[in-house]
């Protein structure tokens, strides 16, 4: 039920929220207003035309029948059946003769002319016994074969366009209106879909552009100054400026870090020499603290250099690695930490990557787990959904849900991390995540309880 609701919401969003849907609805609304106005105009003209035709037919029949009444009383058998019905009615309402469906019925109307100069009376009646609208022409004949004043009524049907008496023309017109609206909606939907195809291509290209490859550009498929051409050219110009600014930033970080290495190394050496002196100088404690600060500064510079290399988009040569063997070797190489490390390493999980960088990634995760865990650290290597998976778990406090993304930002350190290790650089996890991205993988953190970091890398092609 929930899945069905989700699909319904997506479809409604496509219609009411998407640009394509809104343009289509606007086109349908405008078209409906115009077509309805045209429909009412056509129906009004149709009704006027049919009423005029009914008036002419009823008038001719009334005049002809009045002439016959003057010569002789009209017998019902003498009145031919036609589309115009006739009644001869005395002033007291007695029906003296009638034709068609008016036979045996009371007078169709009592409207008659009281003006001797104009014996004709016209009326449209939709509430008569015929069940439809008729145009009635009544001719008063004072001198006739009946010997008393009578009124000759001729009633012609008026083709209806609304209500119960709606004519086939009205139904057909309504059907055509609905069909035209559906056709307009379909054509508008397809036209907007086609017009927005370049926008979708631009969106796809932009989604594929990463910080490590800002040299890509969106396609410019139009000319003549169209809006889409202007959009594509503006995006490309923005990408060019962004690429230039990013390159300048990377060069600055790399050059500054490189230029700082030698002075920092020299300063650290001098401080270490002073710190190793046997003499108890008054400032010896300050020198010892300065050694720690410079070591941390040196680590930050080295990490910044490593990030600059990773973000340059030119990773070092790759090789075929057994992720389980690499994890076992890295764990064995590390000095014994404060917590035991348990492993569950599936053999022959092959990936294509650089050994040193993946080892550094694992080393960063192990150091983080050793620092935050309480009693143990677990390392697992397996395969899932066609990917190599390496997990490093600990039973520490873990990462709050709101910080699972923030911990991968540069220099981002949670309060617990600062309390446990004030000398960290805040660059270990960003470097690890950048290494994963360099080889087409991901590094993610799951929320607490416990620390849970998962590395996913594409499995190596076994056919190579």
Image (cartoon, helix red, strand yellow):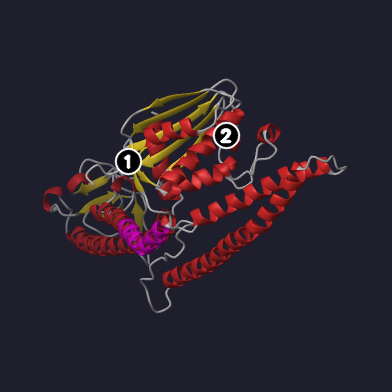
Indicate left or right for 394 with 81 as reference: right
Is residue 387 in sight in this rendering? yes
Q: Residue at x 23, y 60 (%)?
A: 66
What type of secondary structure mainly makes up the magenta span? helix
Q: Which residue is mark 2?
A: 368
Tell which of 253 and 299 is nearer to you: 299
Disc sitting over residue 348 in the figure: none
x, y (%) of residue 139?
A: 30, 60
- How many neighbours does mark 2 have within 10 angstroms: few (below 14), some (14-19), or many (20 or more)? some
Instruction: Give the labeled residue for mark 1.
Output: 459
| SS of the residue under disc 2 | helix
Real-space CA distance between mark 2 and mark 1, rounded to the nearest whole angstrom: 26 Å
Compared with residue 34, is residue 101 higher up or lower down, i.e. above or below?
A: above
At a point 60% along the width and 32% down the height, the residue shown is 400
> Residue 256: where, in percent of width, then height?
63, 61
State the SS at label 1.
loop
**What residue do we see at 63% from left, 47% from top?**
299
Above or below: residue 399 compared with residue 181: above
Residue 150 seen by the camera: no
What range is drawn magenta here? 184-205
Where's the N terminus, which quadrant?
A: top left
Q: Is residue 204 above or below residue 423?
A: below
Name the residue furthest top.
375
In the rendered image, residue 418, in percent from the top left (x then y), is placed at: 69, 36
Name the image quarter holding residue 189. Answer: bottom left
């Amino acid at each position: 039920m929930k899945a069905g609701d989700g699909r319904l919401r997506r479809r409604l969003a496509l219609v009411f929220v998407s640009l394509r849907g809104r343009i289509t609805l606007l086109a349908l609304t405008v078209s409906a207003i115009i077509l309805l106005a045209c429909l009412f105009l056509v129906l009004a003209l149709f009704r006027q035309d049919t009423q005029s035709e009914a008036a002419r037919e009823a008038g001719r029949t009334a005049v002809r029948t009045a002439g016959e009444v003057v010569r002789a009383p009209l017998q019902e058998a003498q009145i031919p059946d036609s589309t115009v019905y006739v009644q001869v009615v005395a002033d007291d309402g007695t029906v003296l003769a009638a034709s068609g469906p008016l036979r045996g019925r009371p007078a169709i109307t009592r409207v008659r002319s009281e003006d001797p100069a104009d014996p004709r009376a016209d009326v449209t009646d939709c509430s008569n016994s015929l069940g439809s609208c008729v145009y009635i022409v009544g001719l008063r004949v004072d001198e006739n074969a009946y010997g008393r004043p009578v009124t000759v009524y001729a009633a012609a049907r008026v083709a209806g366009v609304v209500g119960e008496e709606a004519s086939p023309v009205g139904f057909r017109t309504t059907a055509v209106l609905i069909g035209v609206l559906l056709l307009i909606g379909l054509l508008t939907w397809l036209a907007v879909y086609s017009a927005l195809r370049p926008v979708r291509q631009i969106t796809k290209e932009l989604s594929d552009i990463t910080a490590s490859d800002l040299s890509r550009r969106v396609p410019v498929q139009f000319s003549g100054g169209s809006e889409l051409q202007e959009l594509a050219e503006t995006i490309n110009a923005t990408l060019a400026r962004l690429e230039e600014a990013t390159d300048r930033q990377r060069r600055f970080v790399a050059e500054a870090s490189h230029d700082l290495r030698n002075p920092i190394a020299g300063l650290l050496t001098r401080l270490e020499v002073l710190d190793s002196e046997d003499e108890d100088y008054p400032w010896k404690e300050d020198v010892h603290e300065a050694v720690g600060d410079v070591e941390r500064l040196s680590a930050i510079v080295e990490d910044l250099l490593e990030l600059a290399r990773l973000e340059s988009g030119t990773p070092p040569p790759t090789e075929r690695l057994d992720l389980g063997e690499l994890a076992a070797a890295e764990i064995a190489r590390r000095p014994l930490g404060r917590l035991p490390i348990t492993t569950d390493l599936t053999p022959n999980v092959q990936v294509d990557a650089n050994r040193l960088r993946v080892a550094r990634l694992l080393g960063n995760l192990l150091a983080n787990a050793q620092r935050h865990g309480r009693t143990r650290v677990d390392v697992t290597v397996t395969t899932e959904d066609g990917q190599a998976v390496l997990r490093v778990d600990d039973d520490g406090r873990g990462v709050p849900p709101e910080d699972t993304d923030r911990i991968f930002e540069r220099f981002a350190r949670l309060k617990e991390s600062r309390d446990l290790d004030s000398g960290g650089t805040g660059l270990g996890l960003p470097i690890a995540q950048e290494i994963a991205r360099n080889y087409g993988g991901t590094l993610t953190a799951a929320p607490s309880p416990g620390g849970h970091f998962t590395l996913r890398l594409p499995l190596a092609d076994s056919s190579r």
